[in-house]
Amino acid sequence: MAEIVRGFWGVVFVGFLMLSKWVDSYEFEDFIFNKTSTGDGAITPTPLLIALTLIQGAAAKGAVCLDGTLPGYHIHPGSGSGANSWLIQLEGGGWCNTVRNCVFRKTTRRGSSNFMEKQIQFTGILSNKAEENPDFFNWNRVKVCYCDGASFTGDSENKDAQLQFRGQRIWEAAMAELMSKGMLNAQQALLSGCSAGGLASILHCDEFRTLFPSSTKVKCLSDAGLFMDATDVSGGHALRDVFKGVVSVQGLQKMLPSNCTNKLDPTSCFFPQNLISNIKTPLFLLNAAYDFWQIQSSLAPPVADPHGLWHDCKRNYEKCSASQIQFLQDFRNDMLNAIKGFGASKQNGLFINSCFAHCQSERQDTWFADDSPLIDNKPVALAVGDWYFDREGVKVIDCAYPCDKTCHNMVSK
C-alpha cells in the first residue's frame, strides 16, 4: 500500500504499488487512489465527474489504441471569461517496452477503450472551482486518454501480435476533434500532462503551437515528466533499458525530434533532458527533485537491487541510510544540472520542489489547497498561473532535503 504523509484537509492517500516485477513497476500511477475527508471526518463534496467521449472518426484515420479500439477523451466546457481558453491534459500511465507487455496492456485501460473508465474525476488543474483552481477553473478542460504505450508518439504496427502503435495518430485525431469543438477559436491554450503524459507534453509542445495563429497565447506544462537518464543503484541504466525497448518495439526512431536524432541515438531522444532546450514554445517544468516514481522504478527497481538493500528506503525516505540519501542528493544535482540551459531562457518556467512525490498538478492537495507544498510561500497552482499569464517570471528551485516542511511526501507500505 502507498499513502501520503500529509494532505488536503486531512487527505489520506492510499494505493497499491506493484513492484514484484519490472514490468509492473513502471506503471506506478495506475495503482494510486485517494480518499479525501475533512478534519472532522465528513466527506468533502463529490468532485466533478466527466464522461468518456470516444473519437468516432478515429478508426478511419488509423488512430486507434493498442488493440484497435477507438481512443477517447473527457471534456468539460469553459464558461464566461474562459469560454475561448483551452487546457489539454495528456494522461500518463507508463509505457510498454516489449511485445509481451504491450499485449498485456491491451487488457487494460492503457491499451483499450473497452476498459477505460466511463467517468473520471476532474480535480486539481482540471477542477471547475475557483477556490481549487484559481486560474483555469472556467476554461475548456480536456483530459486525453492514453492507450498507445509510448507517450503519444508511435506510428507502426505488429501484425503478428495484433498490436497497433498509433500514438501520433491518436494525438492528431484528438487535436482535430477538439479543434472542431471550438479549440480553433482559442485565444489562450495550455498543453499539460503528468508522468508519461508530461513527457508527451514536451514531445508535442511545438506541434501544439502550430495548431493556432500567432495571436493565440500558447504554452506547455510538463508535470513529473522530467525522466532522467540516470545511473541506477547497480551502476546500470534501468530506465534507459526500458526506453530503448519502447523505441525499438514501437519503431519510434523516425518519430522523435530530428533536431535531437541528428545528434544523438533515438533512445537518448526519448529522454526530456535532451529535448527541452530545443523547445521553442514556452514550457514549464513541474517536478519533485526526489521523484517518487523514478526512485522506485529507475534508480532502485528490483532488477537493479536484487538483494533488496533499497527495499525500505525507496518505500519510505525516513528509512534511508546516509549513503542512500547522498545517492538521492546526487540524483537531484543531476536533475538541476540538466535544466540549467533550459532555465536560462526567460520564457520558460520551473517549480522543482524537494519532495518525494510524483504528479502534483492533478491532485487537489498538491495543486491548490490550504496546506499545499510551497516554494517561497507560493503553491504550484499560483506558480503556474503567474508564469502562464506573465504576471511574473517563475523559476523556483527548492533547497535540498530535508529543508522543505510543506511537502506531501509519499511512502508505501
Image (tube, rainbow, N blue to C red):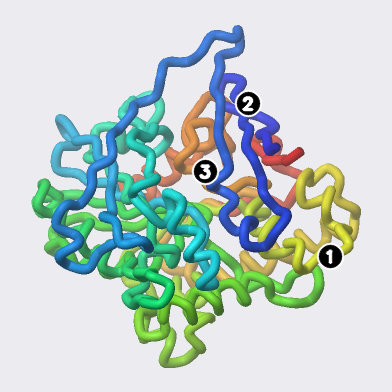
Residue 360, numbered circle:
3
Distance, label 3 to label 1, CA atoms, is 30 Å
Residue 51: image location, x then y, percent: 28, 34
Q: Residue at x 70, y 36 (%)?
A: 405
Return the residue at label 2.
Answer: 12
Taking the spot 42% from the left edge, 49% from the top edge, the residue there is 109
Q: Quadrant of the C terminus?
A: top right
Q: Is residue 366 visible?
A: yes
Task: Give percent across and percent down for residue 265.
Answer: 51, 88
Q: In this figure, what is the number of numbered marks?
A: 3
How busy is the neighbourhood of tag 3: few (under 14 within 10 Å), some, or many (20 plus)?
A: many
Q: On screen, 129 above or below 186?
A: above
View extreme (front): residue: 160
Q: Name the secondary structure under disc 1.
A: loop
Q: Is residue 202 left or right of residue 340?
A: left
Q: Which quarter of the rendered picture does the N terminus lie within?
A: top right
- The answer to which of 306 and 201 lies nearer the viewer is 306
Q: Position of residue 29 (x, y in %)?
A: 55, 48
Residue pointed to by mark 1: 306
